[in-house]
Amino acid sequence: MYGLGIAKGLAVTFRNLFRKPFTVQYPEEAVPQAARFRGEEFGWFEERCTGCASCAKYCPLGIIKIVTHPGGSNMQEGQSYTVDTFDIDIGRCMFCGLCVEACPYDALFMGSGFERGQYVRDDLIIPIEELKSAERRLSTWYRPQLEGKNYHPHKDEPLSWEEVGRK
Amino acid sequence: MPIRTEPITVNIGPQHPSTHGVFRMRVTFDGEMIIDVEPIFGYLHRGSEKLAEERTYTQVITLTDRLDYVSSMSNNLSYVLAVEKLSGIVPPERAMYLRVIVAELQRIVSHLVATGFFLNDVGALATPLMYCFREREKILDMFEMLCGARITLSFMRVGGIFQDAPSEFWEALTDFLEYMPGYIDEYERLITGNEILLSRTKDIGVLSSEQAINSSISGPILRASGVKWDLRKADPYDVYDRMEFEIPVGTVGDNYDRYLIRIAEMRESLKILQQCVNQIPDGPIRADTANLIRPPVGDAYGHVEGPKGELGFYLVSDGGISPYRCKIRSSSLINLTALKDMLVDTKLADMIVTFGSVDINMGEVDR
Amino acid sequence: MDNAYVPFKEANAFYGNLYQFLTDLTIFGVSPIPDWLAYLIAGFLIVFSVINTVVIITTLGTWVERRLIARFQSRLGPNRWGPWGLLTPIADAVKLLSKEDTKPDGVDSWVFNLAPLMFIVPPILIFAVIPYSHNAYISNLNIGILFIIAVTTVPTVAMFMAGWGSGNRYSLFGAMRGVAQLVSYEVPMVLSIVGVLLFVGSLSMVDIVERQFVPFILVQPLGFFIFFIAISAEMNRSPFDIVEADSELVAGFHTEYSGMKWGTFQLAEFIAPFGAASIMTTLFLKGWEGPILPGPLWFFLKVGFVWFILLWIRATLPRLRVDQIMGLAWKFLFPLGLINLFVTAAEVLAWGDPTGSEIWLMAGINWTIAVVCLVISSHLVSAKLTTRNSVLENAGNN
């Protein structure tokens, strides 16, 4: 009979009127984030980096700029370079994480933030100073060692360079 | 005395609320009746195929994410299968199961989006759309647990996937399999029997099976036209040959059939997911491949049954680290070619509904 | 009851007192306000207050509507400005007023600029004859319902002016659809009202309320059904919103409008449901009358209820196609309206002025007829509209 389908539909919407909304009011309340969330604010550990620039080579868009000079002071490997410039232009970054995957020394990590809006494009470039001083809330993406510790970037403390290695 | 009438040409798109992206149609109307349709596309051309020639095989995966951005997993899978065929890599079993799981989740996501926007085009004030997106969010949350991204996933790698699924993913998936059938029932109650929807969609935009085959249509549209063709059965990849599921087939090939097929396919996907969860073995998730793959000289074509149809990657290798040529057989573009057959002699309002039921994605059409 | 002309200042207490106060005012022995000025001031004040009340309730209504539709869609809805987002309408108004008023090339300026004004005046005029409570109305026009039918046709012209003046093909499509739709739905709407008028024997809205022994929805179920559908179509509310049809025509006849002109269209469209709910309350739900609670409160409760149902339907149903809407009016509602009219006329002829038990007998007859008519006609309409199951074929290995 004509109208039964319409009545059924009206019943469904009426029931949803009394359901809890599934959206949240973002600035006051945020949806929980997964530990692997690939966010901005890359975590970079100068102590682990040898300046090999694998990350820059693997980046599909070529947005990592690295300038080095010989004679670094890497804590683990014998030979290394000192990194003078390590600029990541997150204005063009697509957060694929291939740079993190490429890093042989676990020196580069994806961050977990997503609130780095800027008014000027140039401000979206993360310079080396910021990478050095930033609080490292590391994503566990492609880092099984962090996942093994059940590390969560927002619930746990930021990590130092000794704690993030594979050994 | 007959009233003098003249046809008017209306430019629909590229900026229009329901052209699903930057699609443009030059439509000639006689009153409200359509007498000619000319689709024009290319507004979202980004040169993905050419860019692929400049990237290494692994880097191309990030490009495939952006083809059909509603179903990145299927794109990843299709490309990865092509590279594996090209270089003779066999992924481990656990990886194959995980790939099937994410591909089916992605199919549900894509069908939810398609159904939601289709109903929105019919004019239901975004209510079904919001309900569909509610469940889509749950799946996207699972993708976030799995690979840290929600839309552009870059989840798969040549020879497997990049990282094993965390334990929270399995819990979320088990929950999802429990409550999702109820939600699909809710969509059906909301709108499937609705007389307004029936009168708007039945026998509108009919595509006969003959026309569909001649235009090389694939996916839910082909099946709605009554052709029993699904690459998951016809040319099984990964572990689809071990799955038991049915192919929903339509009878008329109108808009309503296309809607029903999508709903039925979501239920079938849930069946496949349940079997995968039961069967998945332990083991490695990635074959021992170098990060920089150099496939032997040759060519290969990998294809999957994506949510919108057959999605294929044809790769030619010259032995280097990047493909010599990458051709994408995008389902959306080819499905669009039958648009004129479906639209002529329908009304303006039917045009939008038919266009919604074809379910295209401009990222894939223009590549 | 006699339909003699009642002087306005006697009927309306507020107006009468104000008029009296102004004319009696004396400063140093002279009365500074002449008779005609007092008449004007008092009239202006009462009209001013009613129009502003309507507009304020409507702006509040936009907030309620957006919140409720959000909840129907299991969203939160606007909640940024003020507590629970109550100041959102004010923010909207400020935004619209400060926006640039664009005017595309090829626009017929006069027609283009006049259309929003013509669109908003008629819905407000409806409230001139609606009785809110006992002796609370702007005017008790002896042709009240006729007046409403007359003014509600004016937006059709405004719609066509907007569509034609914009010089945009989407607008033209919307305007043509709008004219066809509104002209079609006038007929069933008037037919359904006539059933009520036969009972009452008066066109005055006050008389209609006062002579409802029981809410007329009980006696005139078919009439209410037809009127409900027809008035939804008159207002271009979902599922009859083909005039705007945002997924087809961008915004229909007001595609090219921006700033406060667009806001005026929008305001008129938000006032319309309140107007429609008020008419329905007056005609079918016994207006302000009800037990215990005071009259105005009953009136607003009933209006709110009808308005909520309109909203609920808007949140659920998809849109009909233009030819289906015309078909619904002429093939479905028009015959039903005629049946309703004949049955009611026969009953009124048989029983004269029905009171007491006769009215329940009539209600019984009318409900039976309504159900039978609806079932038969819906079967005729839905012969083709059965659901279909997709065939599940186990393809094996194909």
Image (cartoon, coloured by chain):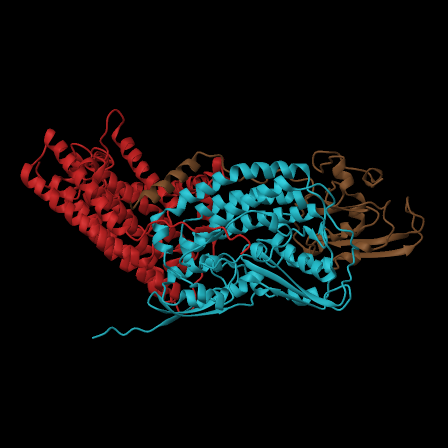
Task: Give coordinates of residue B217: x percent, y percent.
Answer: 51, 63
Instruction: Work out whether residue B17 can be spotted.
Output: no
Taking the image as shown, residue B134 lies to the left or right of residue C332, namely right
Task: Give coordinates of residue C28: x percent, y percent.
Answer: 24, 35
Q: Which chain is red?
A: C
Taking the image as shown, residue A109 lies to the left or right of residue C277, namely right
Q: In which quadrant of the rendered image does the C terminus of chain B lie?
A: bottom right
Q: Residue at x 76, y 52 (%)?
A: A99
Residue extending furthest toward the top: C292
Query: Which quarter of the figure has residue C254?
Result: bottom left
Instruction: Work out whether residue B312 can be spotted.
Output: yes
Tally of numbered tags: 0
Task: Give coordinates of residue A56: x percent, y percent.
Answer: 79, 56
Task: Give coordinates of residue C221: x percent, y percent.
Answer: 21, 40
Taking the image as shown, residue B227 lies to the left or right of residue C377, namely right
Taking the image as shown, residue C298 lies to the left or right of residue B346, namely left
Q: Residue at x 44, y 52 (%)?
A: B259
Q: In which quadrant of the rendered image does the N terminus of chain B lie?
A: bottom left
Colour of chain A in the image: brown
Q: Residue at x 77, y 57 (%)?
A: A58
Q: Which chain is cyan?
A: B
* B185 up-or-down from C360: above or below: below
Which one is nearer the viewer's eye here, C55 or C372?
C372
Which one is nearer the viewer's eye here, C366 or B311?
B311
Which one is nearer the viewer's eye here, C76 or B310?
B310
